[in-house]
Amino acid sequence: MKFFLVVYGISSGIIVGAGVISILILIGIVPRMSHVTNTKQFISVYENLLVIGTFIGSILSLHNLGIHQGRVITIISGLSYGVFLGFLSSGLTEVIYYIPVISRRLKLPKNYLKYVVISLMIGKVIGSLLGWAII
């Protein structure tokens, strides 16, 4: 019975991991990050850091561990997580063509689209901060 649970757990982890990676590939976070920062020569470094960060985050989450390294490391990791979530949310927005659809339905002029994007980002930040502060 334990063998079955181990195989089931590993199989489920592989399926979920493949799903996450396929979404990240579909969204194109790594090429987007390299294009925005003009660092196309570091694409392999970005991919490796993404895999390592996902693995370490999974281990820490699975074993309910925490890293207590002080304020500097907390600030750096928080900013890194925020950058990753920003790229993820902007990639999702572009993939589903949310902004063009909403601008056509609301009949917004094209020069107001930047305000729509900024308001989406501010809303995500405020929602995240409220979620973290309340929980």
Image (cartoon, rainbow, N blue to C red):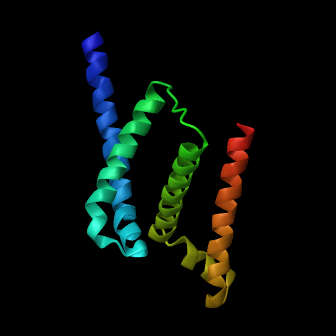
Give the left or right position of residue 86, taking residue 122 as reference: left
Q: Nearer the viewer, residue 27 or 61?
A: 61
Which image quadrant for residue 53? top left
Question: Across the whole image, how many numbered discs are drawn on residues?
Answer: 0
Give the left or right position of residue 126, taking residue 64 as reference: right
Horizontal and vertical percent for residue 101? 57, 76
Q: In the rendered view, would you say 69 is above or below 34? A: above
Give the left or right position of residue 107, taking residue 72 as reference: right
Q: Nearer the viewer, residue 7 or 122?
A: 122
Q: In the rendered view, would you say 126 is above or below 6? A: below
Q: For the point 33% across and 34% down, which residue is it?
A: 13
Quarter of the image containing the C terminus? top right
Q: For the point 55% across and 54% down, which residue is it?
A: 79
Horizontal and vertical percent for residue 133? 73, 42
Q: For the point 57% across and 75% down, which residue is it?
A: 99
Quarter of the image containing the N terminus? top left
Outermost residue to the top: 1
Q: For the point 41% across and 35% down, which residue is it?
A: 58
Which image quadrant for residue 37? bottom left
Which image quadrant for residue 121? bottom right
Horizontal and vertical percent for residue 50? 36, 51
